[in-house]
Image (cartoon, grey):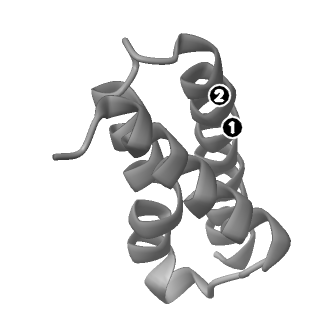
Amino acid sequence: MFTKKILIYIALLITLIRFFIPLHPDFDTLLVWLFILYIIPIILCIIGFKSDKLIATMITIPNLMGIGYRLFIFFNDFLHLK
């Protein structure tokens, strides 16, 4: 049976893979990549937050910042193309 701490370490692993293999998706598949690379670690950290709050917070905040950055770039590109 999975413990909640294992979920946090899976989220950390996904975040580290995303960090060291920089994927720059095109804007057509951006929402899919946002879900796979950013939302899944956040969901795992929310589920396992009670077991290790510090690591869960250290994973959640950069992922939220990444979502904000990607959406900012998407809307910036969208507005400048029109």
Compared with residue 53, is residue 44 higher up or lower down, i.e. above or below? below
Q: Could you tell me residue 58's position as x and y percent?
A: 69, 26
Q: Which residue is depicted at the point 53% across and 45% down?
A: 9
Nearer the viewer's eye, disc 2 or disc 1?
2
Q: Nearer the viewer, residue 26 or 43?
A: 43
> What is the tally of numbered marks visible in this picture?
2
Residue at 40% of width from left, 19% of height from top? 49
Q: Are marks 2 and 1 in contact (CB under 8 Å)?
A: yes
In the displayed structure, would residue 41 be above or below residue 81? above
Q: Which of these two is toward me, 79 or 33? A: 33
Residue under label 1: 65
Label 1 sits on what residue type? Met
Task: Say which mark, if any, is on residue 61.
Answer: 2
Residue most toward the left? 1
Secondary element under disc 2, as helix, strand or loop, is helix
Which residue type does callout 2 highlight? Ile
Tell me the quarter of the picture where residue 51 sits.
top left
> What's the residue at 16%, 46% (across, down)?
1
Callout 1: helix, strand or loop?
Answer: helix
Q: Is residue 63 above or below residue 78?
A: above
At x 63%, y 84%, the residue is 25
Quadrant, the C terminus? bottom right
Left or right side of 53 for 15: right
Instruction: Determine whether 20 is above or below 5 in the image.
Output: below
